[in-house]
């Protein structure tokens, strides 16, 4: 398979997916409010051995936007339909970061036969507290009134560690560009969807596929304890903490993270 962007009609929208490489399918599902570009170094690394698929989710990147609420179920459904349209039948390795992880639980719930393994980065299984939901709805108001520029810079300290802010300024720049290029309605719709997502905490013991959990040691949004607790419940699990990285560990420490993923993939 050669390097290409494919635009596929999926559940009534046009969805763009970046595809490259050959071999077993490795699906990269981005975080909020970003797009497939956050996985650039993973795409380059893994296309040598896998068919990498990195979609822009509904409302993000170059995919179509739908207004209102886009639930995690809807995103999971879109991904399943995308795989159907692309005629990918082999079970996928599902690699999701943060919101990509929330979507992973729904994908597992609805389409377990489609899964070969999980790589879950900087995410959690719990749903939101009342305060968390209110904060999301405040962000929805802000972004609808004032656009993504009103949230981009202030998100950076939560997304990457202080060390990354100081030593790798290009990461903050790239994140700000991704956020500011995202449509405000798309941001609002998935933010509302995350606010109503289900809690999967009491289902973790049922996960049958090999699972790699990756978290940045300095992650403010999904701190290491959160993922360590998840690792205590998932049966076939490996837990990795990435030194000096924050919430965007695959961007902040790509060599470390890619190596950990590669070792895991060789064993499953
Ligand atoms: C993300 O990185 O996808 C977000 O932090 C998810 C969230 O807002 O809970």
Image (cartoon, grey):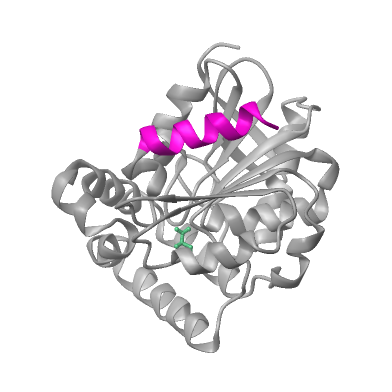
| Residue 104 horizontal/vertical position (percent) | 66, 52
Q: Nearer the viewer, residue 251 or 223?
A: 223
- Locate the N terminus by quadrant: top right
Residue 189 visible, this angle: no
Outermost bottom residue: 130
Q: Position of residue 182 (x, y in %)?
A: 39, 51
**Residue occupying the far left of the picture:** 166
Magenta stretch in the rendered image: 254-268
Which quadrant is the C terminus positioned in?
Answer: top right
Q: Which of 81/225 is in front?
A: 225
Residue, x 25% and y 67% (percent of image)?
154
Q: Is residue 233 magenta?
A: no
State the image coordinates of residue 96 (x, y, percent, origin top left): 56, 47
Q: Residue at x 55, y 84 (%)?
A: 129
Nearest to the observer: residue 56 or residue 9: 56
Q: Quadrant of residue 22?
A: top right
Q: In this image, 231 relative to 44: left or right?
A: right
Magenta span includes 257:
yes
Report the residue at 71% width, 68% height from top: 200
Residue lying farthest to the right in this orientation = 113
Q: Is residue 151 above or below residue 214?
A: below
Can the viewer see residue 250? yes
Q: What predominant SS class does the magenta segment belong to?
A: helix
Which quadrant of the figure has residue 198? bottom right
Relative height, residue 118 to residue 133 (above, below): above
Lateral position of residue 143 relative to residue 81, left or right: left
Q: How many marks?
A: 0
Q: Where residue 173 appears, x then y in whole percent?
A: 21, 46
- Please indicate whether residue 63 sits to the left or right of residue 78 in the image: left
- Left or right of 12? Residue 245 is left
| Residue at 72%, 46% in the rendered image | 11
């Amino acid at each position: 398979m050669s390097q290409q962007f494919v635009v596929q009609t999926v559940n009534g929208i046009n969805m763009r997916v970046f595809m490259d490489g050959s071999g077993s399918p490795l699906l990269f599902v981005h975080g909020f409010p970003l797009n497939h570009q956050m996985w650039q170094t993973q795409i380059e690394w893994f296309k040598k051995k896998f068919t990498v698929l990195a979609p822009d989710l509904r409302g993000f990147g170059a995919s179509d936007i739908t207004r209102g609420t886009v639930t995690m179920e809807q995103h999971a459904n879109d991904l399943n339909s995308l795989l159907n349209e692309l005629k990918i039948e082999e079970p996928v390795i599902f690699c999701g970061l943060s919101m990509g992880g929330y979507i992973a639980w729904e994908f597992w719930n609805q389409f377990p036969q489609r899964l070969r393994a999980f790589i879950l980065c900087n995410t959690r299984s719990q749903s939101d507290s009342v305060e968390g939901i209110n904060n999301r709805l405040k962000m929805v108001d802000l972004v609808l009134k004032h656009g993504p520029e009103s949230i981009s810079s202030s998100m950076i300290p939560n997304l990457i560690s202080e060390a990354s802010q100081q030593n790798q300024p290009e990461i903050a720049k790239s994140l700000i560009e991704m956020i500011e290029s995202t449509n405000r309605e798309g941001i609002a719709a998935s933010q509302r969807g995350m606010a109503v997502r289900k809690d999967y905490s009491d289902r973790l013991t049922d996960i049958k596929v090999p699972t790699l959990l990756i978290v940045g040691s300095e992650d403010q949004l999904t701190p290491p304890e959160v993922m360590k607790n998840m690792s205590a419940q998932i049966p076939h699990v490996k837990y990795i903490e990435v030194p000096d990285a924050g919430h965007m560990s695959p961007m902040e420490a790509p060599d470390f993270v890619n190596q950990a993923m590669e070792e895991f993939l060789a064993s499953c």
